[in-house]
């Protein structure tokens, strides 16, 4: 305990570290918060149409969830290299990383777009047997999927901007996109200002419009702002064999990691979807509320990856090791505060959905949030350790093992046993699933202590 207090005091005295962390983490967290607000507003508007509407859109968005995780994996792996190149002031290779990342992300968007647009009902049947949810979800999915290429482009450029410490512009763009999304949600869901009342399809169309505006805006910022990632198309290519080998040896485990982990968490939804629309509605609402605090740790993990990557790329391994310890202290302090916030404010959030949801659904949401708060210390440690510390030094193969083994060997079996065999209520099943976070935290901590992540990839290239 004495050592922890000493380390905490030293961290707060390191104003340079705190300033860099805030400069990166705060804009990323704000951007995530803005996206969460959009999801919350979407759910509130859709929630007025009933539990089935919430469930159908929640399940339809699982396709988008897997897609965005795949893109996140591409960009996270790319960002590791880009951050280290930036620490080494190697702009030429950063632009090549951008080219590979864009190619992979846009290809992934097409792979997900085609079946979602052509066979939306078939995609929905993967998650639920409810005819009403399938019908509503398919109407939403067929339109929303058209936004996937825009999402791929935007997220790739945002990841590259973060790697070069340009984090303010994406927040401003998110604000614009969110305003567009909310306005068109109101107009198209409920049929205001002479527009037809489209229900869930209107929410999908509003999302599409907002994503187009967002991707166009990010391109304007990148090129008119003359950022380090602004370049001619030819500068994104010309990859050597050695460059591609290094890229994929670092990024491929992350890509596979996020995709397989995303598939695994989507399989949870298959279990939840067979527990009934009320169970799906409860977990959908609870997850949306939880995202309000999770964005803080997304920002912290993004700052961890960028700052540690910059330090290691500059050859300052000892400082990187110290900063990693500091990030874990910050994570612990923020976890305590946000867990209390979740529990204390849960009914304030739940009341926003009433009277659109029943008292039973509201009670289930409350219990799910309480379960989430109990497991937060483990889950948020994993965020910072896996996404931030381990990946920053290219220890991506171990991250792949930690994430995928937790989901597929612990989370998924417990979801189906709890929900479909033991027929437990949704909050109990959710608690069983969250046991994977305990497993991941134990293995992840051992790996962190081994220091195999402490590497200068820029020099190794």
Image (tube, rainbow, N blue to C red):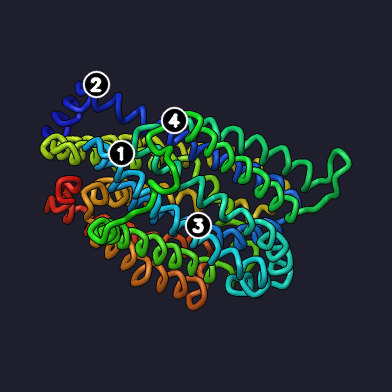
- The quadrant of the image that shows the N terminus is top left
Q: In this rendering, which labeled residue sits more in front, label 2 or label 4? A: 4
Taking the image as shown, residue 460 lies to the left or right of residue 62, namely: left
Q: Earlier in the sequence, mark 1 or mark 4?
A: 1
Q: CA distance from mark 3 to mark 2?
A: 40 Å
Disc number for residue 91: 1
x 74%, y 49%: residue: 48
Residue 253 is situated, as x and y percent measured from the top left of the image, at: 30, 62
* Residue 283: quadrant of the picture: bottom right
Tag 3 near tag 1, CB within 8 Å: no
Is residue 375 visible in the rendered structure shown here? yes
* Residue 183 versus residue 262 in the image, above or below: above
x 36%, y 27%: residue: 23
Q: In this rendering, which labeled residue sits more in front, label 3 or label 2? A: 3
Question: At numbered mark 1, what does the secondary structure look like: helix, strand or loop?
Answer: helix
Label 4 neighbour load within 10 Å: few <14, some 14-19, many 20+ = few
Disc number for residue 15: 2
Q: Earlier in the sequence, mark 2 or mark 4?
A: 2
Q: Identify the residue at the far bottom of this view.
A: 421
Q: In this rendering, which labeled residue sits more in front, label 3 or label 1? A: 1
Disc number for residue 226: 4
Tag 2 near tag 4, CB within 8 Å: no
Disc number for residue 106: 3
Q: Earlier in the sequence, mark 4 or mark 3?
A: 3
Q: Earlier in the sequence, mark 3 or mark 1?
A: 1
């Amino acid at each position: 305990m004495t050592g922890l207090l000493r380390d905490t005091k030293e961290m707060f005295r390191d104003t340079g570290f705190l300033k860099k962390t805030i400069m990166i983490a705060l804009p990323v967290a704000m951007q995530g918060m803005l996206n969460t607000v959009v999801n919350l507003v979407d759910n509130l508007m859709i929630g007025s149409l009933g539990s089935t509407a919430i469930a159908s859109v929640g399940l339809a968005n699982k396709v988008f969830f897997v897609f965005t995780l795949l893109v996140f994996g591409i960009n996270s792996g790319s960002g590791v290299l880009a951050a280290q190149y930036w620490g080494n002031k190697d702009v030429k290779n950063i632009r090549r990383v951008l080219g590979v990342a864009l190619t992979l992300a846009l290809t992934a968007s097409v792979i997900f777009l085609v079946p979602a647009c052509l066979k939306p009902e078939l995609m929905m049947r993967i998650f639920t047997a409810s005819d009403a949810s399938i019908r509503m979800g398919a109407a939403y999915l067929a339109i929303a999927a058209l936004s996937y290429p825009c999402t791929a482009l935007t997220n790739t450029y945002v990841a590259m901007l973060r790697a070069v410490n340009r984090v303010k512009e994406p927040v401003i763009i998110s604000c614009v996109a969110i305003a567009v999304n909310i306005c068109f949600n109101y107009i198209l869901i409920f049929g205001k200002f002479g527009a037809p009342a489209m229900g869930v399809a209107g929410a999908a169309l509003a999302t599409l419009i907002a994503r187009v505006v967002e991707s166009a805006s990010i391109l304007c910022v990148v090129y008119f702002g003359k950022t380090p990632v602004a370049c001619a198309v030819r500068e994104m290519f010309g990859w050597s064999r050695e460059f591609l080998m290094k890229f994929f040896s670092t990024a491929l485990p992350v890509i596979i990691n996020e995709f397989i982990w995303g598939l695994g968490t989507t399989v949870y939804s298959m279990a939840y979807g067979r527990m009934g629309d009320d169970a799906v509605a409860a977990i959908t609402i609870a997850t949306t509320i939880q995202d309000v605090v999770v964005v803080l740790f997304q920002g912290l993990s993004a700052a961890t990856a960028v700052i540690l990557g910059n330090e290691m790329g500059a050859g300052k391994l000892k400082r990187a090791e110290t900063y990693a310890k500091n990030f874990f202290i910050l994570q612990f302090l923020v976890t305590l505060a946000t867990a209390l916030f979740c529990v204390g404010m849960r009914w304030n959030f739940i009341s926003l959905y009433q009277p659109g949801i029943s008292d039973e659904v509201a009670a289930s949401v409350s219990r799910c949030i309480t379960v989430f708060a109990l497991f937060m210390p483990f889950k948020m440690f994993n965020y910072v350790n896996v996404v931030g510390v381990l990946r920053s030094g290219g220890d991506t193969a171990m991250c792949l093992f930690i994430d995928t083994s937790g989901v597929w060997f612990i989370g998924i079996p417990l979801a189906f046993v709890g929900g479909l065999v033991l027929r437990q209520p949704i909050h109990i099943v959710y608690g069983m699933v969250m046991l994977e976070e305990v497993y991941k935290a134990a293995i992840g901590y051992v790996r962190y202590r081994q220091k195999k992540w402490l590497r200068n990839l820029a020099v190794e290239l």
